[in-house]
């Protein structure tokens, strides 16, 4: 299926790349003369112009990120196939073994360093075969890592440890970090979050004039439909308040409260342990609910106080929740639209 790039997808891609593409790291400058030098891979540039990076990487990195989920072989290492996030845990163990080896070498504990490095190589060899699409990348890392083994075997001085670090750091940035930047967000969006477009919620207000006939008949909303109706009720509240129709604003605020108060049904699908309500705890919801005290028809309306409290609620409830959940939800939906599982307008 041909790639469809929209202004929305360009914006998402730009934001993701801005978030994920940090400056490269440089190794420590000291070198060793005690062991034969190993040629280090060329380090990535320390800084890249974002506009040029987006232009050059959009079709290769952004397009893949926006239109396809991570390799399906990963299904075997995440729920429901496993009881835990096995692949992520194995990656942490892999990283820890390499870190231990360098840490022990830095402190002159060379026997421990060799043992940890051997553990790292063994785990790397196993993980290389788990995802066929990534086997070549793992193979490159394994080849360079094997070349470092003699340094751990012969190392005995602080200068030797510095030399290992100098060789390792460009390798990590060029191969490990580049792959993580390319794949990690797709993995997180696919396996660490629920599939947002499959979530169904009861309609909290069947009298909402913005409900479609189908929504009113089924009394069930998709998560996206639910959030759109919540957003619409908020817009109504603001619109009526702005023109001084406090009675209508008050009714719209009551609809807003119904939608906000029932969001916990979706939250508890993941955050099952009370009182982990995060962004919709009682104190946060009260910032919106208590706005009705400032929307009393016939009384002098304090517009400044109303807008200030509204902004506090929006920042504490809406923005913080969106920062955590919106990007994964949009990625999931983009993949589903590309494969035909979801229609663009759903």
Image (cartoon, helix red, strand yellow):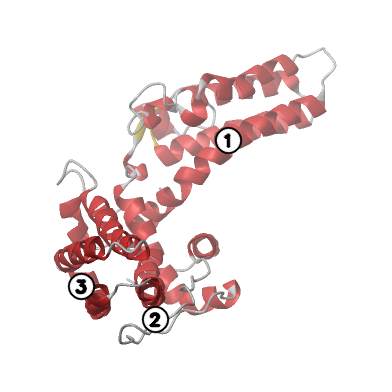
The secondary structure type at the circle numbered 1 is helix
Where is residue 282? Give x, y as percent: 53, 19
Mark 1 vs mark 2: in front: 2
The correct choice, above or below, for 50 with respect to 101 in the image is below
Q: Mark 3 or mark 2, which is nearer the start of the sequence?
A: 2
Residue 50, image quadrant: bottom right
- Few, some or many C-alpha atoms within 10 Å of disc 2 (few <14, some 14-19, many ≥20)? some
Name the residue: 18% across, 70% down. 132
Distance CA(mark 2)–CA(mark 3): 32 Å
> CA–CA distance between discs 1 and 2?
65 Å
Closer to us: 268 or 161: 161
Task: Out of 281 and 157, give the one closest to the viewer.
Answer: 157
Q: Name the residue beneath numbered marker 2.
A: 32
Q: Name the residue carrying label 3.
A: 135
The reply to whether dot 1 and dot 2 touch (C-beta < 8 Å) is: no
Q: What number is the disc on residue 322?
A: none
User: In the shown orientation, is residue 173 left or right of residue 289?
Assistant: left
Residue 97 position in % (x across, y down): 26, 59
Frontmost residue, 222 versus 48: 48
Quarter occupied by the N terminus: bottom left
The reply to whether residue 288 is in sight is yes
Q: Secondary structure at mark 2?
A: loop
Mark 3 lies on a secondary structure that is helix
Write the residue at 20% across / 44% down: 79
Query: Label 1 to label 3, Cα distance in Å?
Result: 47 Å
* Label 1 or label 3, whichever comes before in sequence order: 3
- Residue tagged 1: 232
Question: Which percent across, then down, holds residue 183?
Answer: 35, 63
């Amino acid at each position: 299926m041909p790639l469809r790039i929209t202004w929305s997808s360009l914006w998402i891609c730009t934001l993701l790349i801005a978030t994920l593409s940090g400056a490269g790291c440089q190794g420590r400058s000291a070198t060793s003369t005690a062991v034969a030098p190993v040629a280090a891979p060329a380090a990535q540039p320390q800084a890249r112009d974002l506009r040029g990076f987006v232009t050059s990487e959009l079709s290769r990195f952004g397009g893949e990120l926006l239109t396809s989920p991570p390799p399906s072989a990963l299904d075997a290492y995440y729920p429901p196939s496993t009881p835990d996030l096995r692949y992520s845990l194995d990656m942490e163990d892999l990283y820890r073994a390499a870190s231990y080896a360098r840490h022990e070498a830095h402190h002159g504990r060379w026997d421990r360093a060799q043992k940890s490095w051997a553990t790292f190589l063994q785990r790397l060899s196993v993980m290389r075969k788990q995802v066929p699409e990534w086997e070549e990348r793992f193979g490159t890392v394994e080849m360079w890592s094997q070349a470092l083994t003699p340094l751990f075997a012969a190392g005995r001085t602080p200068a030797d440890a510095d030399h290992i670090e100098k060789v390792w750091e460009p390798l990590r940035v060029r191969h490990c970090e580049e792959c993580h930047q390319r794949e990690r967000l797709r993995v997180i969006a696919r396996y660490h979050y629920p599939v947002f477009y499959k979530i169904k919620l009861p309609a909290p207000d069947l009298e909402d004039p913005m409900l479609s006939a189908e929504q009113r008949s089924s009394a069930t909303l998709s998560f996206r439909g639910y959030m759109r109706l919540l957003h619409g009720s908020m817009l109504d509240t603001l619109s009526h308040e702005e023109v001084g129709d406090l009675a209508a604003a008050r009714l719209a605020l009551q609809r807003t409260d119904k939608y906000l108060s029932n969001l916990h049904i979706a939250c508890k699908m993941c955050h099952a342990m009370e009182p982990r309500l995060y962004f919709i705890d009682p104190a946060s919801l009260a910032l919106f609910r208590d706005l009705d005290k400032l929307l009393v028809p016939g009384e002098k309306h304090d517009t400044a106080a109303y807008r200030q409290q509204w902004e506090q609620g929006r920042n504490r409830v809406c923005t913080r929740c969106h920062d955590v959940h919106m990007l994964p939800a949009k990625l999931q939906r983009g993949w589903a639209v590309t494969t035909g599982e979801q229609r663009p307008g759903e």
